[in-house]
Image (spheres, rainbow, N blue to C red):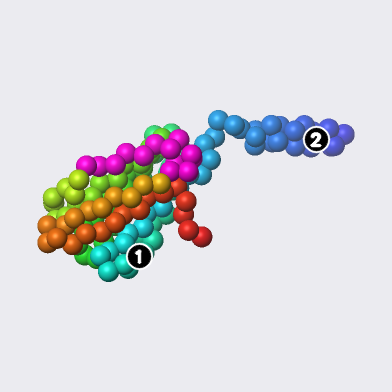
Amino acid sequence: MIRAPLLALALLLTACSGDDDQPALTELAISVENEVGGRSQIACEPLPLLHGSRRLTEHVIDGAFTITVMSSPSETELSFDEGGRALGQALLVSRSALEADYGEELTLVLSGGESYVVSISSRCAP
């Protein structure tokens, strides 16, 4: 008699676990290279999974500029700032682009003339 309720419970739990509407874990990798070739992975930012949730992080690079990352379940917006001055336009990357093997490099030139290459991709280094 106990087997039937346990079997029904197991089948119910299995049916719930295969939900195809649930988005997969999606990440955004950020690395920075300075003028002398020093390269460092700055972050591996996961996009939130829950509808309506947001994630905000700020990364200060060499004490010279800031990368701000605002993520939602559907997209990530990156902005670059040097002491209150925007370094170019904000970059908006969709979840679908990240799931399709996204990659981009941006060159940022600071007010003192120093330049940095920021690499953004959908592959985080292990």
Q: Nearer the viewer, residue 16 or 109?
A: 109
Locate residue 2 relative to residue 75 in the image: left or right.
Answer: right
Position of residue 121 measured from the top left corner of the image (x, y, whole percent) = 41, 49
Q: Secondary structure at mark 1?
A: strand
Residue at the location (43% across, 38% down)? 97
Left or right: residue 82 compared with residue 44? left
Report the magenta residues as a range.
89-102
Closest to the observer: 19 or 44? 44
Disc on the earlier residue, 1 or 2: 2
Q: Amino acid at mark 2?
A: Leu
Residue 29 % position (x, y): 41, 52
Can you tell which quarter of the image residue 15 is in? top right
Residue 80 lies in the magenta-colored region = no
Q: Is residue 13 above or below residue 31?
A: above
Determine the residue positioned at 25% across, 59% down: 116
The residue that appears at 84% across and 37% down in the rendered structure is 2
Q: Which residue is mark 2?
A: 7
Say which amino acid is labelled 1.
Arg
Q: Is residue 57 visible?
A: no
Position of the N terminus, as image quadrant, is top right
Q: Residues within 10 Å of mark 2 (few under 14, many from 20)?
A: few
Q: Nearer the viewer, residue 19 or 37?
A: 37
The answer for how far apart the CA atoms under marks 1 and 2 are is 55 Å
Q: To which residue does mark 1 refer?
A: 39
Residue 30 in sight in this render: yes
